[in-house]
Image: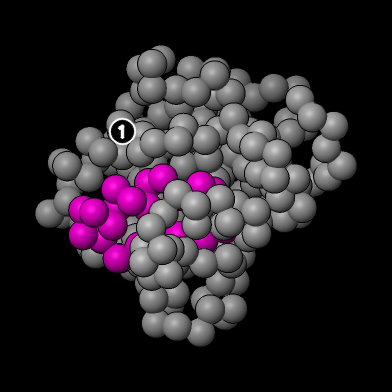
Amino acid sequence: MPDFQSRDPADPRFWNERFAVGFTPWDEARTPPALARFIEGERGRLGARVLVPGCGSGHEVIALAAAGFEVLAIDFAAAAVAQARRVLSPALAQRALRQADFFRFEHDLAEPAAQPPFDWVYERAFLPALPPASWTAWAARTAQLLAPGGVLAGLFYLDQTLPERRSRPPFVTTRAELGSLLGGAFDCTAAEQLPADEVLPVFGGRLWWMVWQRR
């Protein structure tokens, strides 16, 4: 691992350093097959507007836009947004990509496409990138951004037990901890562990596709 200066994943500089040198072991450089299956199976039952927080390189944005969704993809790290601009077409980047903070983006982006509520939120490597101390705020914010009946769907990094210390991302959680975070506003409607060949080594084979519906 390179000798990075920033150690705080709540600071955009942490992620800027890593994107700047291409140290992104969480990046599949493709649309995850689980998302492709979900889009194919649920497209007619999902609303049009989808938020992609912590979008990173933005590969999924291509598949979401191609499926007809109105996408808002945000990241607070300038280097991540710059990388996504290299992945997306200029027209798609112009339409869907913004540098913004998940916890306040609608105030920073004075445009209709950035205003909640959204029909669904796509999760991939965003929650495990956030320090666990901010997870309660993440859960409340996600519920706030979704319309009633809206969906939080994506890949969740779960283990049976928590490590003694969660010192750096990706930060793992447990099914029980995730349920405690989301259970006040969401019902889990689907949960399936991904096969090993669909999981990057950094996640140690412990990714689950989950769907949570806003009450």
Q: Is residue 74 left or right of residue 5?
A: left
Q: Quadrant of the C terminus?
A: bottom left
- Note whether 194 is above or below 99 in the view shown: above
At x 56%, y 44%, the residue is 127
Residue 111 seen by the camera: yes
- Note whether 113 is above or below 127 in the view shown: below
At x 28%, y 57%, the residue is 65
Percent position of residue 158, x then y: 51, 28
- Note whether 155 is above or below 103 in the view shown: above
Q: Quadrant of the N terminus?
A: top right
Task: Read off the magenta span.
Answer: 56-75
Q: Is residue 144 left or right of residue 14?
A: left
Q: Is residue 69 one of those drawn in magenta?
A: yes
- Density class for disc 1 (Cα within 10 Å; few <14, some 14-19, many ≥20) is some
At x 33%, y 27%, the residue is 192
How many marks on residues? 1
168 and 146: which one is in front?
Answer: 168
What amino acid is at disc 1? Ala
140 and 53: which one is in front?
Answer: 53
At x 36%, y 66%, the residue is 91
Q: Residue furthest top?
A: 196
Q: Disc 1 marks which residue?
A: 34
13 and 10: which one is in front?
Answer: 13
Percent position of residue 39, x then y: 22, 45
Q: Is residue 157 one of those drawn in magenta?
A: no
Callout 1: helix, strand or loop?
A: helix
